């Protein structure tokens, strides 16, 4: 793994940085207030080539590697992780199609999704099944050449803006995790009911919704992969999506560091800037350590994925570390700001709210630790 960015990767980084500085940062506070999907920003990002980046060129995407996409995601996350999550949502929602879909399925759906700038959401989580994806209760029952879905999905990011859903359901109840299958479902399919956005602490520009399937019929040809392969598809999806997600957490941690460094360098107390106090200085140093360490973990996990090597352990390590690092650095930034940091007028308040979810979604920190222990004994 080459630690130096190539000339092309520097271009990718700069392109995402310019979009962040020109579009995301100026609008972040307003979209946090609106708390709905930022469709105008998605359109701008699509125009700039910043959506669907990992989709192969033959299907209309940019064909970026996972590593290249993480370089871009760090820049987007620096501006606002709610907006960055919303803009890159397809790189989670489309992964089941890219990983498990046939070439015919990809050729049938991907060009239209990209041309029409459609949103695709990933539907796994349920009211009674979060990290334990093998406990899903949504069912798919075969009736002739169709599968009929019934059940409830929860915390579906971008579900209220989606045109397509990658839905995981139980097709063989007696087979445990081998009884799950994946379906690519139109969001306007009869029997699919989308609720209003859930009121959230942070990342409000990436709305999450409840989705009900009530006798929702899906054609047989919309099953991705073979019957019973859904659990494997979920795990393969997370091995790719976790580095992409964690890169945004690194971006948030970097923003927290920069805000804290700037404030501590101008705020004076007892005749000197507060950065000169060891207690504050050590907090700033820890923030810098977290950024460097998190970036290294993310890029290594992404690089392994690009090489076709197993990266389950490395992706879990990155997810566990970067989620905690983002939260710790955002909290420390508020502490450096002191009382004013508790004000909604300051960017660090939003950073702290946005950071918390990184410890939870796509597998909690504790789930990542379980994965790491399992992989240690497996190896």
Image (cartoon, helix red, strand yellow):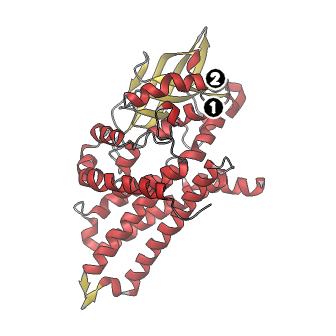
Q: Residue at x 54, y 47 (%)?
A: 65
SS at badge 1:
helix
Alpha carbon distance from label 1 to label 2: 10 Å
Quarter of the image where one finds residue 49: top left
Q: Position of residue 100 (x, y in %)?
A: 62, 31
Q: Nearer the viewer, residue 262 or 125?
A: 262
**Relative image position of residue 271 (x, y in whole percent):** 24, 91
Pointer 1 and pointer 2: residues touching (CB < 8 Å)? yes
**How many circles with numbers are drawn on the protein?**
2
> Relative to residue 255, is residue 177 depicted above or below?
above
Could one spot residue 360 in this view of the protein?
no
Mark linked to residue 230: 1
| In the depicted structure, whether residue 3 falls above or below residue 86 | below
Residue at numbered disc 2: 171
Q: Position of residue 11 (x, y in %)?
A: 42, 55
Which corner quadrant holds the N terminus? bottom right
Which badge, 1 or 2, is on the more N-terminal residue? 2
Work out which residue is located at the far bottom of the displayed protein and give it: 271
Give the x, y percent position of residue 319: 55, 55
Within 10 Å of disc 2 (Cα), the crowding (few <14, some 14-19, many 20+) is many
* 11 lies left or right of 348: right
> The C terminus appears in which quarter of the rendering?
bottom right
The residue that appears at 30% across and 74% down in the rendered structure is: 262
Question: Which residue appears at 35% of the width and 32% of the height?
Answer: 161
Which residue appears at 25% of the width and 64% of the height?
Answer: 346
Question: In this rendering, would 231 be left or right of 209?
Answer: right
Left or right: 137 as drawn, with respect to 81 = right
């Amino acid at each position: 793994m080459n630690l130096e960015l190539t000339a092309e990767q520097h271009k990718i980084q700069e392109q995402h940085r310019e979009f962040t500085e020109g579009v995301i940062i100026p609008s972040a506070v307003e979209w946090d207030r609106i708390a709905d999907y930022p469709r105008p920003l998605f359109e701008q990002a699509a125009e700039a080539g910043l959506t669907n980046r990992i989709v192969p060129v033959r299907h209309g995407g940019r064909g970026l590697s996972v590593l290249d996409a993480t370089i871009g995601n760090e820049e987007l996350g620096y501006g606002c992780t709610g907006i960055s999550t919303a803009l890159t949502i397809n790189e989670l929602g489309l992964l089941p199609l890219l990983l498990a879909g046939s070439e015919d399925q990809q050729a049938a759906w991907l060009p239209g999704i990209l041309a029409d700038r459609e949103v695709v959401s990933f539907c796994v989580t349920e009211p009674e099944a979060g990290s334990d994806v093998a406990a899903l209760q949504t069912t798919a029952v075969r009736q002739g050449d169709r599968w009929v879905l019934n059940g409830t999905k929860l915390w579906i990011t971008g579900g209220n803006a989606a045109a397509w859903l990658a839905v995981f359901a139980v097709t063989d109840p007696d087979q445990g995790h081998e009884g799950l299958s994946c379906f690519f479902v139109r969001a306007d399919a009869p029997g699919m009911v989308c609720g209003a956005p859930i009121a959230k602490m942070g990342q409000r520009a990436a709305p999450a919704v409840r989705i009900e399937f009530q006798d929702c019929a899906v054609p047989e040809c919309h099953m991705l992969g073979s019957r019973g392969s859904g659990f494997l598809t979920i795990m393969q999806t997370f091995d790719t999506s976790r580095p992409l997600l964690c890169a945004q957490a690194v971006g948030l941690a970097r923003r927290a560091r920069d805000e804290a460094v700037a404030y501590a360098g101008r705020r004076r107390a007892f005749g000197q800037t507060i950065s000169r106090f060891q207690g504050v200085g050590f907090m700033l140093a820890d923030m810098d350590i977290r950024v460097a360490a998190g970036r290294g973990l993310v890029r290594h996990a992404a690089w392994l994925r690009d090489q076709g090597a197993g990266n389950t352990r490395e992706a879990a390590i990155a997810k566990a570390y970067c989620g905690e690092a983002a939260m710790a650095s955002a909290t420390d930034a508020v502490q450096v700001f002191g009382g004013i940091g508790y004000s909604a007028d300051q960017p660090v308040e939003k950073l702290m709210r946005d950071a918390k979810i990184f410890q939870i979604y796509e597998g909690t920190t504790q789930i990542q630790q379980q994965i790491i222990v399992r992989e240690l004994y497996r190896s």
